[in-house]
Image: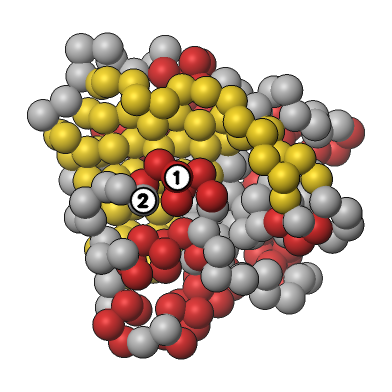
Amino acid sequence: MFEEFGKAYWEERYRGHAAAYDGRPNPQLVAEAGELAPGTALDAGCGEGADAIWLASRGWRVTAVDIAGTALHRAREHAETLGADLASRVDWVQADLTDWTPTEEHFDLVSTHYVHPAASREALFHRLAASVAPGGTLLIVGHHPSGPQPTGSHASALQVHFTAEEIAAGLDPGRWDIAVAEARTRSATAHEGHDGHEHHEGHEGHEGHEGHGITIHDTVLRARKRP
């Protein structure tokens, strides 16, 4: 199931498209992490690296993970053009989030946007939540069910459509404080989304778009793990 979201699928997508990096991080990341004190961050499904590079530019030490080697190669090149100091703050890791397990209670920020899990979404989010350090922040952004729904051969992409309340329900209330759990809409320019996806590309996250302006329906969950 969800074979379309395996390594071969995403490598083919990347190799078939020119680099889509424009330097702009996901606006929900900026809104929710812009005031956080920098520390260690995990960008799960980094695509071409805009989010990871933005975090590094703000002083974070980032582990950026994606399944697609082509995406990571482009991301690394983008970072290097911004200087050795910034580039040194990002570790690019090629891994499939379906079976990759980050170090538990290690990261001050764990962020994932529009993840396309090739298996259980709940299991993935459980592993990501476990990797947040005490006092740290979990940020999950996805497509809200009120937005356009995938059909036909892309019906399995329903895995990326969920509500913040569904994700919050999977977090232990004795360990987590929910800061934000809501649906948001925002306008996107022509190249910022495809089938409702963000302007980056990557296995665990982002697809390109060509066409007219669209409205993105985002699910946003931000939670803090209690010290």
The quarter of the displayed image where residue 59 is located: bottom left
User: Is residue 48 depicted above or below 9 in this figure?
Assistant: below
Q: Is residue 30 left or right of residue 58?
A: right
Circle 1 packing at 10 Å, graded few (<14), some (14-19), many (20+), is few
What residue does disc 2 label?
34
Disc 2 marks a residue whose amino acid type is: Gly
At x 52% / y 23%, what residue is drawn? 182
User: Is residue 146 depicted above or below 136 in this figure?
Assistant: above
Mark 1–mark 2 Cα distance, whole angstroms, equals 6 Å
The quarter of the displayed image where residue 116 is located: top right
Q: Are marks 1 and 2 in contact (CB under 8 Å)?
A: yes
| The one of 197 and 73 positioned closer to us in this rendering | 197
Q: Quadrant of the C terminus?
A: top left
Q: How is the image coloured?
A: secondary structure
At x 65% / y 27%, what residue is drawn? 144
- Residue 218 x, y percent position in the rendering: 61, 34
Label 1 SS: helix
Disc 1 marks a residue whose amino acid type is: Ala
- Residue 108 x, y percent position in the rendering: 22, 46
- Residue 150 x, y percent position in the rendering: 80, 33
Numbered label attached to residue 31: 1
| The one of 120 and 142 positioned closer to us in this rendering | 142
Label 2 SS: loop
